[in-house]
Amino acid sequence: MMTALNLQMIASAGGTVEVNAANYTALNLQMIANAGKNKGAELIVKNANKLTALNCQMIASANPGHVHFDFT
């Protein structure tokens, strides 16, 4: 499994990152989303039902329009 720091580096280079919410903290996900902001990188969060609505809002606001949550 990749560390949150590894994923931040990938996102900051412009890479789309897809993660399982159960494997990272909400703060880690927010930092990954923010790392991709300058390059327009996407963050896809699977198993997002593990997060609270407030967590999802904070993560999404870190990179508006480029964070996708999968609640299925």
Image (cartoon, rainbow, N blue to C red):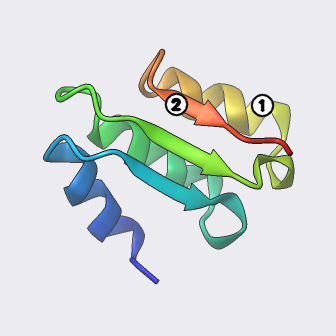
Residue 66's x, y, as percent?
44, 25
Q: Is residue 46 left or right of residue 67?
A: right
Residue 42: which disc?
Answer: none
Q: Is residue 45 above or below residue 40?
A: below
Total count of labels = 2
- The residue nearer to you, when weighing 67 against 72, is 72
Residue with the mark numbered 1 = 54
Q: Does residue 28 appear in this view?
A: no
Q: Position of residue 47 (x, y in %)?
A: 77, 55
**Farthest top residue?**
65
| Lower position in the chain sequence, tag 1 or tag 2 | 1
Q: Picture coordinates of residue 39 (x, y %)?
A: 17, 29
Using the image, determine if residue 20 lies above or below residue 3.
above
Q: Quadrant of residue 60?
A: top right
Apparent side of residue 63 relative to residue 7 in the rendered image (left or right): right
Residue located at (52% from left, 30% from top) = 67
Q: Amino acid at mark 1?
A: Leu
Using a 10 Å C-alpha cutoff, classify the residue at mark 1 as few (fewer than 14 neighbours), some (14 to 19) or many (20 or more): few
- Residue 45 at x, y percent in the picture: 61, 47
Whether residue 18 is situated above or below residue 38 in the rendered picture? below
Query: Judging from the image, what secondary structure is the residue with disc 1 in?
Result: helix
67 or 26, which is in the foreground? 67
* Residue bearing the label numbered 2: 67
Q: Quadrant of residue 10?
A: bottom left
Residue 8 found in image quarter: bottom left
Instruction: Please identify the quadrant where the C terminus is shown.
Output: top right
The three-letter amino acid code for the residue at tag 2 is Val
